[in-house]
Image (cartoon, helix red, strand yellow):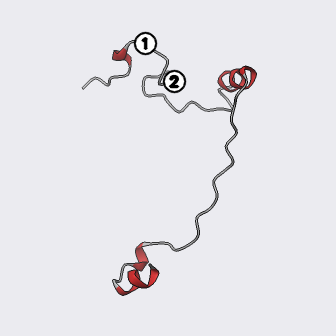
Amino acid sequence: MKESLTRQKLAAKYTFDSPVTDRVVKLLNTFTGIKTLFGDSNRFKVIYTSAGYGSVLMFDEIAKYVLAL
């Protein structure tokens, strides 16, 4: 691949380093673990904040998820 991209003068646009391993995922499968995670907002940051709330699955009303145009 590198040789082909070099011939096409495109090699400078790419990196040929090996991928780096991601962090190990920790699965939570106990009520206590899940409760701890959701209860400690200082250590475990919320990723869904578009509506100003903490979870994308927090509401039953569809209107809460639809952005006003």
Residue at 56% over, 72% down: 17
Residue occupied by mark 1: 60
Residue at 65% over, 26% down: 41
List x then y, in percent, for residue 6.
40, 84
Residue at 38% over, 12% down: 61
Of pointers 1 and 2, the one earlier in the residue sequence:
2
Q: Nearer the viewer, mark 1 or mark 2?
A: 1
List x then y, in percent, for residue 25.
67, 43
Is 55 left, or right, of 37 in this rendering? left
* Disc 1 packing (10 Å; few <14; some 14–19; many ≥20): few
Q: Quadrant of residue 64?
A: top left
Quadrant where the C terminus sits is: top left
Is 17 left, or right, of 11 in this rendering? right
Residue most extreme to the bottom: 7
Residue most extreme to the top: 61
SS for dot 1:
loop
SS for dot 2:
loop
Quadrant where the N terminus sits is: bottom left
- Residues 57 and 12: in front is 57
Residue 17, numbered label: none
Residue most extreme to the right: 32
List x then y, in percent, for residue 24.
69, 48
Q: Is residue 69 above or below residue 16?
A: above
* Disc 2 packing (10 Å; few <14; some 14–19; many ≥20): few
Residue occupied by mark 2: 55
Q: Quadrant of residue 30?
A: top right
Q: CA distance from mark 1 to mark 2?
A: 12 Å
Q: Quadrant of residue 26?
A: top right
Residue at 53% over, 33% down: 47
Q: Is residue 61 above or below residue 1?
A: above
